[in-house]
Image (cartoon, grey):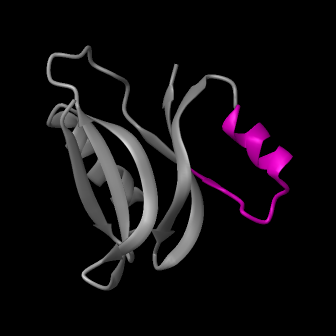
């Protein structure tokens, strides 16, 4: 399984991050994980994809901002919203601030 690591600016908006992820999926990659990190000593969003050439089409990714002030059980309830499958959950920089983000698809 070929993997591809991409970076997205720490100052990108949530819509900008979503569009970047969706673009990679048009190139036959599927999202595996999201996280914050450092690239060249600078804060960045690290996004890992796997090669999905020949795989069936999937519905577009949606990103959900989950309030980090919520207790873990309420965050879990947000992740288990009816009608969605969570691809991954982690921290991303959105407009420069760390946020808890769920990447998900409609069922």
Q: Which of these two is toward me, 96 or 88?
A: 88
Please say whether residue 67 is visible from this viewpoint. yes
Eyeballing the image, is 8 above or below 74?
A: below
Report x, y in % for residue 102: 56, 46
Q: Residue at x 55, y 72 (%)?
A: 98
Residue 28 % position (x, y): 17, 31
- Where 36 sits versus 47, above or below? below
Q: Residue furthest bottom?
A: 41
65 drawn magenta: yes
**Exactly how many numbered labels are in the figure?**
0
Q: Give the quadrant of residue 54.
A: top left
Residue closer to the observer: 78 or 6: 6
Res 58 quadrant in image = top left
- Using the image as rendered, state which of residue 43 and residue 78 is in the foreground: 43
Horizontally, residue 33 falls left or right of residue 28, namely: right
The N terminus lies in quadrant: top left
| Residue with the most extreme front position | 1
Note whether residue 102 is visible. no
Residue 73 highlighted magenta (yes or no): yes
Tell me where residue 45 appears, x and y as whole percent. 38, 66
Question: Which residue lies at the image location 58% right of the left edge and 27% below the top edge?
Answer: 84
Q: Is residue 78 left or right of residue 43?
A: right
Which residue is found at the position 71% from the left and 60% from the top? 67
Picture residue at 47% right of the left edge, 79% below the top: 96
Could you tell whether 7 is left or right of 27 in the image? right
Residue range in magenta is 64-80
């Amino acid at each position: 399984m070929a993997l591809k690591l991409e970076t997205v600016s720490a100052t990108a908006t949530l819509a900008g991050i979503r569009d970047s992820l969706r673009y990679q999926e048009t190139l036959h990659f599927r999202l595996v994980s999201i996280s914050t990190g450092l690239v060249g000593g600078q804060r960045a969003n690290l996004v890992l994809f796997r090669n999905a050439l020949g795989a069936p089409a999937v519905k577009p990714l949606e990103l959900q901002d989950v309030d980090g002030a919520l207790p873990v059980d309420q965050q879990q309830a947000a992740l288990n919203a009816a009608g969605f499958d969570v691809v991954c959950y982690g921290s991303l920089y959105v407009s420069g601030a760390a946020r808890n983000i769920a990447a998900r698809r409609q069922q």
